[in-house]
Structures are given as C-alpha cells and as structure tokens.
Amino acid sequence: MSAVNPMHPMSQLAVENAQKLLACVIWKLRKHCPNLAVEITEKDMEQLADVFMSNGQQGNIAVIGKGDRIVLQLIDSVSGKALIQQHGDENSPNAVMMTKCLAARKRAPVVANRLRHDSNVSTVGKPLAREAAEILELLTWEPGA
C-alpha cells in the first residue's frame, strides 16, 4: 500500500508516525470495546488484499488534515472514493450483531429511565425487564473470530 500523494505533508506525517497512528486507532476504538486487542493473521492480510483489489479497486489509506487533527480513511486510489465492501460483509454475523449493539446503546438511556421510574412505583413489568436484559446482553457482546 502506498500514499495517495506521497509528497503531501499529511502523507509524510502518516508514514513517519505509522506505529503511533495504529496505537491511536486502537486507543479510540477502546471507547467502544474496552479490552480491545487486535490479532492479525496471514488470512486477515490475504482478505485485506482481496477486498482492496476487488471490483477493480486499488485500496489505499487517505490521510486528510482537518485543523489540529487528521482523518484516516480507506479509499480507492483511482476514484478517491471510500472502498466498496466485499459483497456480503455487511450481513456477516459480527456486522449484524454490531448493528444490534449500536441500536441497544441508543435505547439504553430510555430503558434506564423507565426502570428507575417503574422501580419507584414498584411496577417493573416483564416486557421492560426483558428489554433491559436484552440491552445488557448486547452491550456485553464481544465479536467472534
């Protein structure tokens, strides 16, 4: 993989600080997955190459400077557009579960308020208890291999 514009200061910054940028990416993702550790196998590298070069794409990383920060994005070198996912990735079991987890995270504050209210009047019903249990299960889900 090469820089889209290797002479651009942001591309040079990314090359010089690749390890630090990887650490920052993992650090930012830890907000959503506190025990995050990323294991990369040969198969992962092969799959990355397959996706990056599928559908005539030439995968690359764009390093975009925005004020006091940079944005890293996977793009197609030729078009400059975000890489197209391999067909079916969006329906993988992990992708489906992550979508459910993100939806549960949005529902959680409302359910928490309902639980507080209902517990004050001693009327926590089965549907609310089940919804709360479902949210807790989803929020503790960890992706499989």
Image (cartoon, rainbow, N blue to C red):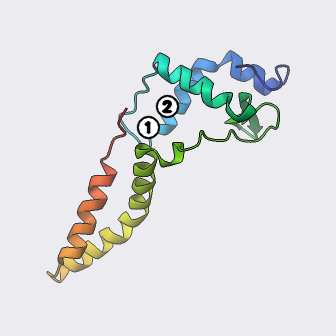
Q: Above or below — where is 122 with respect to 94?
A: below
Residue 24 location in percent, x, y?
55, 30
Q: Is residue 72 visible?
A: no
Please say if 23 is above or below 71: above
Q: Marks 1 and 2: in contact by CB < 8 Å?
A: yes
- In the image, taking residue 89 as reference, residue 64 lies left or right, namely right
Q: Nearer the viewer, residue 113 or 134?
A: 134
Question: Which percent across, then down, holds residue 9?
Answer: 81, 24
Tell me the element at label 1.
loop
| Residue identifier under label 1 | 30
Real-space Cα separation, disc 2 to disc 1, in angstroms: 6 Å
Q: Residue at x 67, y 31 (%)?
A: 54
Q: Quadrant of the C terminus?
A: top left
Q: Amino acid at mark 2?
A: Ile
Residue annotated with mark 2: 26
- x, y percentage for residue 80? 80, 37
User: Disc 2 on helix, strand or loop?
Assistant: helix
User: In the figure, is residue 89 to the left or right of 103?
Assistant: right
Residue 117 location, x and y as percent?
Answer: 26, 78
Q: Quadrant of the N terminus?
A: top right
Number of numbered discs: 2
* Residue count near mark 2 (Cα–Cα under 10 Å), binned few <14, some 14–19, many ≥20: some
- The answer to whether 44 appears left or right of 76 in the picture is left
Q: Quadrant of residue 92?
A: top left
Q: Residue furthest left?
A: 122
Decide if residue 101 is in sight here.
Answer: yes
Viewer-nearest residue: 87 or 106: 87
